[in-house]
Image (cartoon, rainbow, N blue to C red):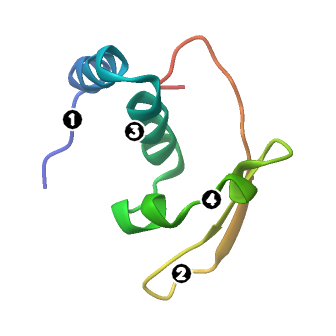
Amino acid sequence: MTYLKPAELLKVLQAAKDKSTRDFCIILLGYKSGLRASELCRLTLDDVRGGYLDVQRLKGSLHTRRPLQHHANPLL
Protein backbone atom coordinates (compact mmCIF):
# COMPACT_ATOMS: atom_id res chain seq x y z
CA MET A 1 0.00 0.00 0.00
CA THR A 2 1.32 3.44 -0.86
CA TYR A 3 0.47 6.64 0.96
CA LEU A 4 0.47 10.25 -0.09
CA LYS A 5 3.56 12.19 0.83
CA PRO A 6 2.91 15.41 2.80
CA ALA A 7 3.55 17.58 -0.29
CA GLU A 8 1.10 15.48 -2.32
CA LEU A 9 -1.56 15.73 0.36
CA LEU A 10 -1.13 19.50 0.51
CA LYS A 11 -1.70 19.62 -3.26
CA VAL A 12 -4.92 17.60 -2.85
CA LEU A 13 -6.08 19.92 -0.08
CA GLN A 14 -5.26 23.01 -2.16
CA ALA A 15 -7.17 21.64 -5.16
CA ALA A 16 -10.16 20.92 -2.91
CA LYS A 17 -9.93 24.41 -1.39
CA ASP A 18 -9.82 25.96 -4.87
CA LYS A 19 -12.99 24.07 -5.78
CA SER A 20 -14.97 24.78 -2.60
CA THR A 21 -14.57 25.29 1.13
CA ARG A 22 -16.94 22.36 1.69
CA ASP A 23 -14.72 19.93 -0.22
CA PHE A 24 -11.63 21.17 1.60
CA CYS A 25 -13.29 20.68 5.00
CA ILE A 26 -14.55 17.20 4.16
CA ILE A 27 -11.16 15.98 2.90
CA LEU A 28 -9.27 17.54 5.81
CA LEU A 29 -11.69 16.15 8.40
CA GLY A 30 -11.51 12.70 6.86
CA TYR A 31 -7.72 12.74 6.72
CA LYS A 32 -7.15 14.07 10.23
CA SER A 33 -9.72 11.72 11.76
CA GLY A 34 -8.86 8.62 9.77
CA LEU A 35 -12.43 8.26 8.57
CA ARG A 36 -13.61 5.96 5.82
CA ALA A 37 -15.50 7.60 2.94
CA SER A 38 -18.73 5.95 4.12
CA GLU A 39 -18.22 7.36 7.63
CA LEU A 40 -17.69 10.85 6.21
CA CYS A 41 -20.87 10.54 4.15
CA ARG A 42 -22.91 9.63 7.23
CA LEU A 43 -21.83 12.67 9.29
CA THR A 44 -24.41 15.29 10.20
CA LEU A 45 -23.99 18.75 11.72
CA ASP A 46 -24.95 17.29 15.10
CA ASP A 47 -21.89 15.03 14.88
CA VAL A 48 -19.51 18.03 14.78
CA ARG A 49 -21.02 20.41 17.31
CA GLY A 50 -19.56 21.60 20.59
CA GLY A 51 -15.94 21.26 19.52
CA TYR A 52 -16.10 17.47 19.22
CA LEU A 53 -16.47 14.96 16.44
CA ASP A 54 -18.77 12.02 17.23
CA VAL A 55 -18.47 9.11 14.81
CA GLN A 56 -20.20 5.76 14.84
CA ARG A 57 -17.39 3.80 13.23
CA LEU A 58 -18.19 1.07 10.73
CA LYS A 59 -16.83 -2.43 10.15
CA GLY A 60 -16.91 -3.39 13.82
CA SER A 61 -15.00 -0.40 15.17
CA LEU A 62 -16.16 1.43 18.26
CA HIS A 63 -17.92 4.77 18.54
CA THR A 64 -15.38 7.58 18.85
CA ARG A 65 -15.58 11.10 20.24
CA ARG A 66 -12.60 13.31 19.49
CA PRO A 67 -11.94 17.01 20.07
CA LEU A 68 -11.72 19.18 16.97
CA GLN A 69 -8.51 21.17 16.96
CA HIS A 70 -7.19 23.97 14.78
CA HIS A 71 -3.61 24.31 13.63
CA ALA A 72 -2.04 26.59 11.02
CA ASN A 73 -0.56 23.56 9.23
CA PRO A 74 -3.53 21.38 8.13
CA LEU A 75 -1.41 18.22 8.32
CA LEU A 76 -0.96 18.67 12.07
Give the Cα separation between the discs numbered 1 and 4: 27 Å
Q: How many C-alpha atoms fall within 10 Å of the one at disc 2: few (<14), some, or many (≥20)?
A: few
The residue carrying mark 2 is 61
Which of disc 4 and disc 3 is earlier in sequence?
3
Q: Nearer the viewer, residue 7 or 38?
A: 38
Give the Cα separation between the discs numbered 4 and 2: 19 Å
Relative placement, left or right, of 8 versus 47 is left
Which of disc 4 and disc 1 is earlier in sequence?
1
Q: Residue furthest right?
A: 50
Dots 2, 3 in contact, CB < 8 A: no
The residue carrying mark 1 is 4
Q: Secondary structure at mark 4?
A: loop
The residue carrying mark 4 is 44
Estimate the x, y position of residue 17 in percent, counting from the top left: 37, 19
Above or below, 13 against 37 in this view is above
User: Residue placed at 42% from the left, 85% from the top?
Assistant: 59
Q: Nearer the viewer, residue 6 or 66?
A: 66
Q: Nearer the viewer, residue 37 or 44?
A: 44
Q: How many C-alpha atoms fall within 10 Å of the one at disc 1: few (<14), some, or many (≥20)?
A: few
Estimate the x, y position of residue 73 in percent, counting from the top left: 52, 14
Q: Secondary structure at mark 1?
A: loop
